[in-house]
C-alpha cells in the first residue's frame, strides 16, 4: 500500500484503497484538506466550512495515480452533509497584564486620598468619589472592573462596565469609584472579553495588596504627643514675639544712647543700659541673630500647625497667631518698654547669638564691610535742637535750658543780633 502525499507533506490516501473505492478516496481527500494544521502559506491553522466544500475547491495534485485524477474530473458537484460541525480555534490570545493602580482625588488638595501604607495598600476616605487609574498592557480588552471584600469575584460590591470607563486605552483605564466604609480590604476584580461569542471569560481576582484599597482610616500620627505639640507651639509663639519685639526695641537704641543713659539716667536705667550695651555694640550680628531666629520659629509654627490640622485651617490659625502674638503685641510693648524688656531677656538674646553664630557672624561681617560701622554723631545744631525739644516738655527750670540754648547759639550770632535798637531822634544835642 502506497500513500499519496501533497506538496506540503499531508497524507492523502492509500493508492490501493483509492483504486478499489474511488468515492472513498474523495472523502479521505476532503478530510485531509480540512483537518491539516500546517498550510502552505505558513499559517498555524485555518478555519474551513466543510458544508460549503465542493469538488472544485479541491486542488489538483501531482501524483502518478491516474485513477485519482480521473475520479476528480468525473465526479459531479457534491455537497457534504450538514452534520459536519464547523471548527474554530483561537490562535493568538491577548492576555491582560496589570502593572499597578493609582488613586487620585477628584479635586486637587481634597483629603479624599489619604496615602499608602508601607506595603503599598492605598487608603482612601470612605463614601467619597475618587479616581482609580489602572496601568498595564492590553487593558483595552477589559470589559468589567469591580472590587470585592472577599476572595470571590462573584461577590463584588459594585461593577463598572466598559461603557462607564472615563478613559480606556491599551495602557490605561480610568474609572470613578466610591468606596463604602469597611474594615476589610477592597480587592480588584477584572473581566476580559472573550475571543469569540461562544465562551464567556470569568472574573479573575488580582490578589495583590498593592492593587487593593482600604477605607479603614489609620490613627493619625503626630510629630509629638498632642499635649506636647501644643505646648511647643505656644512656646514658639512666645519666642516669635520676643524676637520681633527685641528687633524693634534693641535696634532702636543706638550705642551712643545707651552710653548716655548709663551715664546720666536713673539707677535702674543705668543698670539696664549697662546690660544691653555690650550686646548692642555688635549691631549687625545682633540683627542677623534675631532675624534668623524669628524666621526659623515662624516656620516651625506653620509646620506644627499643619500637622495638628490641615489645609486652610492650619493656614488661618498659624497666620493669626504669628501676626497677633508674634508681631503686633510685642512690637507695641517694646516700643515703650524696649530698655526694660531687652535687659530682662538679655540671656535669651545671648543664647541665640551663640546658637546662630556660624551663620550670623559671617553675614554680619559682610554687612560691616559693605555698610560700615554704626556711628551716630551729634553736632552742635543737633544738640541745640534736642535741648529745644526738651525745653517744650520740661517740667523743671526752663530758664537754665534757655541759657544753654543761648550758649550754643553764640557762635552764629553777631553784635547786631544782640544789640537793642535805639531811636537817636529822641536825644537832644
Image (tube, rainbow, N blue to C red):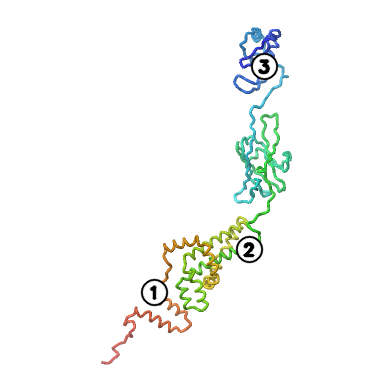
Residue highlighted by disc 3: 32
Residue highlighted by disc 2: 231
Q: Mark 3 or mark 2, which is nearer the start of the sequence?
A: 3
Residue 166 to residue 342: above or below: above
Question: Does the rendering let one see residue 129?
Answer: no
Can you say which quadrant of the picture contains the N terminus?
top right
Task: Determine the residue located farthest toward the left in the rendered image.
Answer: 429
Residue situated in front as seen by the camera: 34 or 307: 307
Image spot of residue 219 (x, y percent): 68, 53
Image spot of residue 323 (x, y percent): 56, 63
The quarter of the displayed image where residue 391 is located: bottom left
Crowding around mark 1 (Cα neighbors within 10 Å: few <14, some 14 to 19, many 20+) is few
State if disc 1 and disc 2 touch (CB < 8 Å).
no
Point 50% across, 60% down: residue: 358
Crowding around mark 3 (Cα neighbors within 10 Å: few <14, some 14 to 19, many 20+) is some
State if disc 3 and disc 1 touch (CB < 8 Å).
no
Residue situated in front as seen by the camera: 93 or 196: 93
Residue highlighted by disc 1: 379
Point 47% across, 65% down: residue: 284
Report, in whole angstroms, how far the alpha carbon at label 1 lies from the one at label 3: 124 Å
Crowding around mark 2 (Cα neighbors within 10 Å: few <14, some 14 to 19, many 20+) is few
Amino acid at each position: 500500500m502506497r500513500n499519496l502525499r501533497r506538496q506540503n507533506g499531508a497524507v492523502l490516501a492509500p493508492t490501493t484503497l483509492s483504486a478499489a473505492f474511488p468515492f472513498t478516496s474523495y472523502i479521505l481527500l476532503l478530510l485531509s484538506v480540512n483537518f491539516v494544521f500546517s498550510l502552505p502559506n505558513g499559517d498555524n491553522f485555518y478555519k474551513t466550512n466543510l458544508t460549503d466544500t465542493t469538488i472544485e475547491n479541491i486542488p489538483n495534485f501531482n501524483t502518478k495515480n491516474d485513477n485519482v485524477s480521473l475520479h476528480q474530473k468525473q465526479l459531479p458537484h457534491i455537497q457534504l452533509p450538514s452534520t459536519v460541525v464547523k471548527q474554530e480555534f483561537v490562535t493568538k490570545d491577548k492576555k491582560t497584564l496589570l502593572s499597578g493602580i493609582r488613586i487620585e482625588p477628584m479635586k486637587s488638595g481634597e483629603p479624599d486620598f489619604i496615602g499608602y501604607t508601607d506595603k503599598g495598600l492605598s487608603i482612601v476616605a470612605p463614601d467619597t468619589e475618587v479616581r482609580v487609574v489602572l496601568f498595564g498592557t492590553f487593558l483595552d480588552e477589559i470589559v468589567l472592573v469591580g472590587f470585592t471584600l472577599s476572595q470571590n469575584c462573584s461577590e463584588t460590591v459594585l461593577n463598572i462596565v466598559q461603557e462607564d470607563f472615563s478613559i480606556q486605552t491599551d495602557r490605561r483605564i480610568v474609572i470613578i469609584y466610591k468606596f463604602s466604609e469597611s474594615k476589610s480590604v477592597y480587592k480588584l476584580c477584572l473581566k476580559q472579553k472573550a475571543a469569540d461569542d461562544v465562551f464567556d471569560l470569568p472574573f479573575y481576582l488580582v490578589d495583590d495588596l498593592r492593587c487593593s484599597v482600604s477605607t479603614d482610616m489609620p490613627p493619625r500620627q503626630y510629630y509629638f504627643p498632642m499635649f506636647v505639640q501644643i505646648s511647643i507651639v505656644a512656646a514658639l509663639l512666645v519666642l516669635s514675639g520676643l524676637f520681633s519685639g527685641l528687633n524693634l526695641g534693641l535696634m532702636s537704641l543706638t550705642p551712643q544712647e545707651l552710653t548716655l543713659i548709663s551715664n546720666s539716667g536713673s539707677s535702674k536705667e543705668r543698670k539696664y543700659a549697662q546690660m544691653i550695651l555690650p550686646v548692642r555694640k555688635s549691631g549687625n550680628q545682633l540683627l542677623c541673630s534675631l532675624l534668623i531666629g524669628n524666621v526659623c520659629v515662624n516656620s516651625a509654627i506653620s509646620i506644627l500647625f499643619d500637622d495638628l490640622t490641615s489645609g486652610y485651617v492650619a493656614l488661618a490659625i498659624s497666620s493669626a497667631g504669628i501676626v497677633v502674638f508674634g508681631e503686633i503685641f510685642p512690637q507695641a510693648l517694646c516700643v515703650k518698654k524696649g530698655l526694660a524688656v531687652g535687659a530682662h531677656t538679655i540671656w535669651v538674646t545671648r543664647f541665640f547669638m551663640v546658637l546662630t553664630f556660624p551663620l550670623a557672624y559671617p553675614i554680619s561681617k559682610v554687612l560691616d564691610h559693605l555698610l560700615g560701622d554704626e556711628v551716630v554723631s551729634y553736632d552742635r545744631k543737633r544738640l541745640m535742637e534736642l535741648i529745644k525739644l526738651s525745653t517744650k516738655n520740661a517740667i523743671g527750670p526752663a530758664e537754665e535750658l534757655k541759657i544753654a540754648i543761648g550758649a550754643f547759639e553764640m557762635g552764629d550770632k553777631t553784635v547786631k543780633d544782640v544789640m537793642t535798637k535805639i531811636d537817636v531822634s529822641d536825644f537832644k544835642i
